[in-house]
Image (cartoon, rainbow, N blue to C red):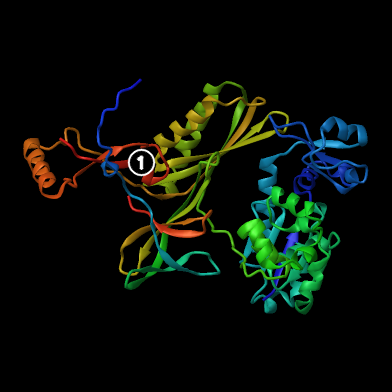
Amino acid sequence: MVASSRAQTNADRVRSLNLPRPVRVTIDVRTGLPITLYEPGRSRAIECVQDSWQVDDEWWREPISRRYLQVILRNGVLRTLFHDRIADRWFEQTY
Amino acid sequence: MSIACIVIPHFALRVALFNRPELDGAPLLLGPAQGERPIVYDATPEAAMQGVRTGLGLREAVALCPEAVILTPHPVRESAAIEQIVTGLERLSPAVESDPGHPGCYAIDLTGLDRLLGPPSLATERLLATVPALLRPRAGVAPNKFTARVAAYEAAPGTVQVVDPTLIESFLATAPISLLPLSSDKQRRLERLGLRTLGDLAALPPAAVQARFGAEGRRAWELARGNDREPVHPRLQPETVSESLTLPAPATSRETLVIAITRLVLRAFDRAALRNRHVRQARLHVSLEGGQAWEQITTLREPGGHKHLIEALGYRLQALALPGPVEALTLEISGLIDATSRQELLPGFHSRRPWQLAEASRHLKQRFGTSGLYRVVEVEPWSRLPERRQTLIAYDP
């Protein structure tokens, strides 16, 4: 039998890094691509999609299907967004 | 808005007729690909008339229909046929969608094409004429994608069925429930409930359908009532670079294949389109002796240059058991982006005054109960999901 170490368990010892952040976007119905990104208190027009790729993974447990888009906002800022195809929601991915 | 839909039932079998047109009209069965279960994957109506159905063991199928011809899937030939059909349709309309889940099903947005191609029915006839008649294509026209697809399946080969916008619901009511884009499990559950037609499903209360089948069921109910607002999604035109190589003699050894692939990759990266660029995906088509073919897609976790790609393709070949000698290879590289670089941690990048950091951490802990300092630790650096690669662990010197 293993003796209790009486050590305190600290849930705050481990934290996630780079978790995707849910975002709200408007979509161009013809292309399926986002045209506006809404952030608290303001909206940013998306100037163009610079790159896009698909990540499909973990089909053996909870399938993950994401369509990533690297977009340039009208103010020149580069952002990475993805569409979660399973939950049909949009997120911003930080690195 | 008018949407046309062109469908080619039993697509893989019809495409096989390109090489053997004399088999047109004979009972055809689609057999298994290399390593799959020996069952019937598809059967033409001529074979179905003799009792053969999808899922039946090949031995039973041949006993039921001795004159049936068994054909094997040929993914290279099928993707070439899809490309040829879509390219042909795109010459007449810029908005052509190929359904990846249903090879041989194409939706075309006819909006704005009246002056070029005439009214919807005539425009669809002209679109239909671009598809080889040997494939027995048929078409439907309706105000939305799903209804157009149902109309296409109900049309006779080589003809166009136009659905009156005011009669959509009554038109759909008699269509079989198997036309709904549902998983086979949900299809079976609907059939077990005695629902055979779209009209049967549309007559149910939407809340009950949603409660039992979730969001997928609710969407199916909407489709069954003719409500489909999904637009036609034309394909993005990805930039690709393709290189081919015919081997001087059929090769069976892995080493020869690795040499050939290395040559293909280097040749591709010599082209101007790939100068100072990285790639994300490579599709390798392999033509085998005896007319068979094999195809593999390799996706890199991070975009990379030629060394990275050769390494990834070589790694994939390690576990490969080819069904025959290789005659030719084609490498299609896609996902081209500007060359990227990644900042790695500098060697020996540690705090020069660890005791100061430890002291600061101790003070913070005394003042707030926790220091709030964390260290970045790699967890799954190979993961394709950025949030899985690293985590923060409390810094406790």
Which subunit holds the residue at mark 1? B
Rendering quarter of residue B3 = bottom right
**Residue in view at x 13 percent, y 44 percent:** B365
Q: In this view, does A9 lie above or below B185?
A: above
Q: Quadrant of the N terminus of chain A?
A: top left
| Amino acid at pointer 1 | Arg
Q: Where is residue B52 in the image (x, y as percent from the top left)?
A: 87, 41
Circle 1 crowding by C-alpha within 10 Å: few under 14, some 14–19, many from 20: some
User: A56 or B369, which lies in front?
Assistant: B369
**Residue in view at x 67 percent, y 35 percent:** B293
User: B300 or B178, which lies in front?
Assistant: B178
Q: Where is residue A90 in the image (x, y as percent from the top left)?
A: 45, 60
Q: Where is residue B72 in the image (x, y as percent from the top left)?
A: 76, 36
How many numbered badges does the structure rendering display? 1
Q: Is mark 1 on a helix, strand or loop?
A: helix
Q: In this view, does B197 lie above or below B16?
A: below
Label 1: which residue? B389
User: A36 or A31, which lies in front?
Assistant: A36
- Residue B8 makes an appearance in the image: no
User: A45 or B355, which lies in front?
Assistant: B355
**Residue in view at x 62 percent, y 24 percent:** B249
Q: Is residue B304 left or right of residue B352?
A: right
Q: Is residue A86 left or right of residue B353?
A: right
- Residue B355 makes an appearance in the image: yes
**Residue in view at x 32 percent, y 41 percent:** B390
Q: Position of residue B138 (x, y in %)?
A: 80, 61
Q: In this view, does B33 lie above or below B53?
A: above
